[in-house]
Image (tube, grey):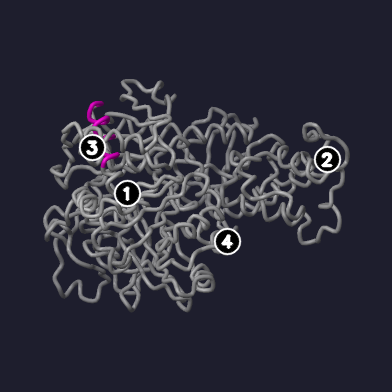
Amino acid sequence: MAHESAEAVEGRAEVTAGQPSAAGAAPPPLLERFLRQARHAPDATALIVGGVELTYRELDLASAALADRLRRRGAGPGRVVCLRLEQNAVAVTGILAALRTGAAWAVVEPDQPPSRLRALLADTDCAVVISSGPDPVLGSVPSAPGLLDVAGLEARELVLEGEASVSAGGSDPDGTGVPDAAPAYIVCTSGSTGAPKGVLVSRGQLATSISPREPVYGSGRCTFLMAMRMSFDGMLGGMFWSFTNGHTLLLPDEKQLKQVHELARLAAEYEATHLIVVPSYYRALLEESRHLPETLRLVVVAGEPCTQDLVRLHHERLPGTPLANEYGPTETTISCTVQPGLDPSWQRIPIGRPWEGAEARVLDERLREVPAGERGELYIGGGFVALGYAGQPARTAERFVADPYGRPGARLYRTGDIAHVDETGALHCHGRTDHQVKIRGTRVELGETEAALEDHPGVGQAVVVCDSSRAEPRLVAFLTPAVPGECTPSWPDLRAHCGEFLVEQAVPVLFHTLERMPLNTSGKADRAALKALIPEAAAGAGGATAARSGGETLGAPRGTSGPAAAGHLRGVTEVWAAVLGHGESGAHDNFFAVGGSSLRVIDLHKRLDQRWPGVLRVGELFDLTTIASQAEALTSRLGTTDPGDEGLPAAYEL
């Protein structure tokens, strides 16, 4: 497209801040900045995770030692190191170690579906997988990369290994000479065609994203708490901001991240000054905990839309702590816009303006900038635009387009988000142009979920819609049988099948069978008509509660008998149905396998506590994950009586 004249674009909506890093001075490489901190403040605390604390000197030594192990297994420029570890000190060390070798890293946690790892290995030149024990997925992949088994390895062992190397006169080729254009990391995301895709980000793009954050994050010494998993690219902002500025990175382990009270205690114990968190998790943190410390100087929400009521709740609980909203698809390197100083009086919460080095444009279908105040599709340009999708040039070309307003060779990323620029110059989002949704901060392509379901031999057609009528959005799948007139597979069968291909957030909570799919005038599935059927789907699932709730049907908890045990079993079954929105849970089904989540555990505990006050603690529900085990705990602690059945308020009758 030819450039338009200045007169033609006058008055159109354009938001820019700074210039792409390629047009000006490139920011210093992140690894170089980390090593500088290790030299200048070696005894400062760099990392706290899972009860392990490492200074900058120790993290330097540990990452150098692990980098040496990786090099001996083929890691280096142009190759990939895959981390299959839970959130711990060795995993963080692994990221820095990969950076030191010149390789890109990719985090595919052990509980991620096998399809994520298979897609990564198919699309990249992976040199080594770091795992805690043998990985069964690797055994099923032809020409699988080598495995670095770190089971039982402690970060301090790597520190000693690094010290021994230094004492022996060893030198570390620290990777600071790797060019900025080299890949830094890959993040696996949902794909609309059914196959996951890996977003490839360069070392220079990562540095460009980190450098401009001081005006929002501040310059004082900080302890940065990231309430996110390592596979979520939003965590990299706080991580590398901390490591390149001499701050302390504070990470929750898996248990602390799942329990908001534990996370709040972690923040208080180490006097966190900064917190980055997904809005839905932050709401639970504010509602369920009174332990967030007064030391917090900034809270940043990212990964989901921030709502007006969340801003109000924040100001009620932490009136002296500023709240900022960050926005950015994975393809635009962590976050590309920010709105600091969120005010509870605002009617709409903006995503703000681009960070320095990024550009944002609101364009129509012909890539013309729309007038300020009008809606169009949001495109991101500048130095934050990722390299593309690993091993998938066609998909890259579809989403990363030539920038008609930029320098030769510049690109824009099509976000798929509908946006406008307000009278102050701030950006606002208004939904999607496609079927992508966010579930608990995770990007979910409905097409990927549909493709996974249609891969089941018992399913003909699958259409998935997002139900936003509840506090936490949920996915509802509408199915037709592969053979007309026959039944579709059972819910447990469908969930188990989905678990092979999809992350937890992309697995539907409800499944509803239809004889035929409603169609719109274009002959496509009528999603509006399907959304109208959600109450019917939920009611149909709820009807199963009666069939499952009797003690005789489900069976009393092991070692118990009598009406109290049956009453506990019946009561817990009813509570589960209310929390999950369906009654398809058997006595021995795992809560997290039938639609539960760490946030739903909070609601589950609240309802159980209303019925049986003080008997079960919220933390226990991550171990007591079945109806039977929870009912058994109630019976053993309450004896032969069931006070939950006496005087139960009508508001809680299910």
Nearer to us: label 4 or label 2: 4
- Give the mark nearest the N terminus, 4 or 2: 4
Q: Position of residue 534 (x, y in %)?
A: 62, 51
Q: Are marks 2 and 3 in contact (CB under 8 Å)?
A: no
Query: Is 394 left, or right, of 298 in this rendering?
Result: left
Q: Position of residue 396 (x, y in %)?
A: 26, 44
Nearer to us: label 1 or label 2: 1
How far is the residue under mark 1 from the one under mark 3?
Answer: 24 Å
> Pointer 1: what residue?
55
- Give the mark nearest the N terminus, 1 or 2: 1
Amino acid type at circle 3 is Ala
**Secondary element at image label 3:** loop
- Give the mark nearest the N terminus, 1 or 4: 1
Amino acid type at circle 4 is Ser
- Give the mark nearest the N terminus, 1 or 3: 1
Name the disc covering residue 103, or none. 3
What range is drawn magenta here? 61-73
> Pointer 2: what residue?
566
Residue visible at 76% across and 44% down in the picture:
634
Q: Are marks 1 and 2 in contact (CB under 8 Å)?
A: no
Residue visible at 13% across and 52% down in the picture:
409
- Predominant SS along the magenta part: helix
Amino acid type at circle 1 is Thr
How far is the residue under mark 4 from the one under mark 3?
Answer: 41 Å
- The answer to whether 342 is drawn above or below residue 21 in the figure is below
How far is the residue under mark 1 from the one under mark 2?
Answer: 55 Å
Quarter of the image where the N terminus is located: bottom left
Amino acid type at circle 2 is Ala
**Secondary element at image label 4:** loop
In which quadrant of the rendered view does residue 357 lie?
Answer: bottom left
